[in-house]
Amino acid sequence: MPVAVGPYAQLQPSCFDLMKMGLVMGCAVGRVAGALFSTFCLRMGMRGWELMGSTGKSMMLSGGTFGAFTAIGMGTRC
């Protein structure tokens, strides 16, 4: 593709911006995966606050882990 030259040229996102985007996308995907995997707690007989606590913990742990690895992966591509 031709490169735009002039006052209206578009700039590429910085490496830090790419890592932030990877972190946010990874956290979102990890939270959804944590919510899906925590439904196995229903089979163990958890109900009420115990179920909500384990679901929240699972979502935060998987979101943080997957987000960190996605951000590192985006950083290595810079």
Image: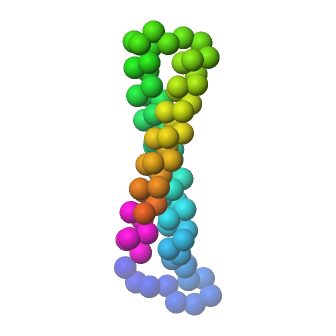
Asked if one can make out residue 13 in the rendered structure from this viewpoint, the answer is no
Q: Residue 58, image x and y in percent? A: 49, 33
Name the foreground residue: 50 vs 26: 50
Estimate the x, y position of residue 46 in percent, counting from the top left: 50, 12
The stretch drawn in magenta includes residue 41: no
Q: Is residue 22 above or below residue 52?
A: below
Q: Main secondary structure of the magenta part?
A: helix
Of residue 65 and residue 78, the one placed in the foreground of this image is: 65
Up the image or down, 15 lies above or below 39; here it is: below
Residue found farthest to the bottom: 6
Q: Is residue 1 left or right of residue 29?
A: left
* Region of the chain picked out in magenta, as a range: 73-78
- 11 relative position to 34: left or right: right
Residue at image location 42% in from the left, 56% down from the top:
70
Locate residue 72: give its quadrant. Answer: bottom left
Res 52 visible: yes
Residue at image location 59% in from the left, 12% down from the top: 48
Q: Quadrant of the N terminus?
A: bottom left
Front one among 7 and 56: 56
In this rendering, the answer to whether 48 lies above or below 32 is: above
Visual colour scheme = rainbow
Q: Position of residue 78 (x, y in %)?
A: 41, 75
What residue is drawn where x is 39% and y is 12%? 43
Tell me which residue sits at (50%, 74%) in the image: 15
Q: Number of callouts in the render?
A: 0
Q: Is residue 72 above or below residue 35?
A: below
